[in-house]
Amino acid sequence: MKRYVEWYPIIVMLAIDFAFAISNILLKKIIMDGMNHLVFITYRQSISTIFLAPIAFFLERNTRPKLTPQILCYLFLSAIVGASLTQYLFLLGIQYTSATFACAFVNMVPVTTFLMALPFGLETINIKDRSGRAKVIGTLICLGGALLLTFYKGIPLIHFSDQQTESQSMEEHISSSKRKERWIFGSLILFAGTLLWSSWFLLQSFIGKKYPCQYSSTVIMTFFSAIQSAILTFSINRRLSIWIPKEMIDMLSVIYTGLIGSGLCYVGMSWCVKKRGPVFTAAFSPLVQVMAAMLDVPFLHEQLNLGSVMGSVIVIVGLYFLLWGKTKEIQKVPQETAEKKDKELTFQVHESNDESRIP
């Protein structure tokens, strides 16, 4: 039974990545329809708050610790780095560059999280041990796969009709001309968003220790995020017309991303950070692009290229190395604790025997 319990965080993260992949596909439609980014974030976080508030109240009413000003400050900061500002920067980055390029920055989140966790002691590297070497190798392989997904396109593996191919080539030509003008600014925005997203995983590990209620902490975070996004929206654009969705599919997309993307997914990630740490949870980020590509081809009829397949396989191999290293590291903790207790017990027995021999 213990072996099955060890697989729970992996299963949860796979489900979260699949839900995020669907959110990314819906997000492309919202961006194409021209919906205001901050309005989208405000709706998304508000729906998540309304959905999770009663669940948090009934499930955690007997176990919820006292909400101190320090915890509120942590959650307010968590809303900024994990929801409001990060989502806005990534949406803005997609607008200035491309969705594929933005996904590549998301794929670098495990590496940045791993490097940022080292100074805080949340992660350790023991090169002499196999688990430590596996974590380093897995992180580098994931980074290599992410770079390959971004910069190598390769030959198309699925051929569409001539009309579709021609329209796609025209879109690629237009997008490439725009990228030349705005690429640097968009890259800086995406890099800032990546750092903030990695910071959220580290901050969540501290919040999980001080306020170990995933539903309640997520509700407070999304509530703060909705307020932050609404204030920022009204400060930039006060026209009420931007709050009205253009199509019904846009509102349905907002509801889905609010209930699942900002609701249950954040609860699941908070739980995984508490169980396995920030690097383990962030390591699954590259799979979002892999799953999104699997859904894009049959449903949106997007082109599947050799580079996407090769990069996806490399990302999965790197993720396997990293997860194997983390699993071995977790398995060593109870063994080392048991060995330490045995040594202390043996030492105490020897001491008592020595004292009994003294006349």
Image (cartoon, rainbow, N blue to C red):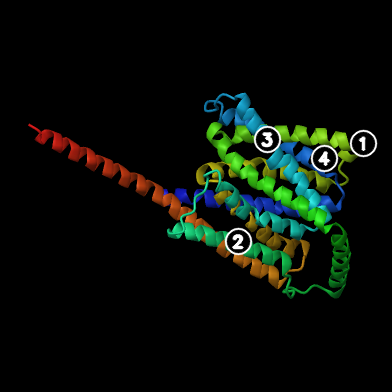
Picture coordinates of residue 187, whole percent (x, y)? 77, 55
Alpha carbon of mark 2 to alpha carbon of mark 1: how far? 44 Å
Q: Nearer the viewer, mark 2 or mark 1?
A: 2
- What number is the disc on residue 64? none
Query: Residue type at mark 4?
Result: Val
Residue 83 position, x and y percent, is 71, 41
At x 61% / y 27%, what residue is drawn? 70
Marks 4 and 1, how far apart in space?
11 Å
- First in residue order: circle 3 vs circle 2: 3
CA gap between label 4 and label 3 equals 20 Å
Q: CA distance from mark 3 to mark 2?
A: 29 Å
- The CA span between labels 4 and 2 is 34 Å
Q: Residue 142 — which label?
A: 2
Above or below, 104 relative to 248 = below
According to the picture, the residue beneath numbered tag 4 turns out to be 39
Q: Nearer the viewer, mark 4 or mark 3?
A: 3
- Front position in the image: 232 or 25: 232
Q: Is residue 91 left or right of residue 132?
A: right
Q: Earlier in the sequence, mark 4 or mark 3?
A: 4
Q: Secondary structure at mark 2?
A: helix
Q: Name the amino acid type tagged 3.
A: Leu
The crowding category of the residue bearing disc 2, from other C-alpha atoms within 10 Å (few below 14, some 14 to 19, many at least 20), is many
User: Is there a contact, CB below 8 Å, between mark 2 and mark 1?
Assistant: no
**Residue displayed at 79% across by 52% down:** 93
**Mark 4 touches mark 2? (CB < 8 Å):** no
Q: Estimate the x, y position of residue 170 in percent, counting from the top left.
A: 88, 68
Q: Secondary structure at mark 3?
A: helix
Contact (CB < 8 A) between labels 1 and 3?
no
Task: Determine which quarter of the picture holds residue 349.
Answer: top left
Mark 4 or mark 2, which is nearer to you? 2
User: Are the residues flagged by discs 4 and 1 in contact, CB closer than 8 Å?
Assistant: no
Q: What residue did someone put label 3 on?
A: 77
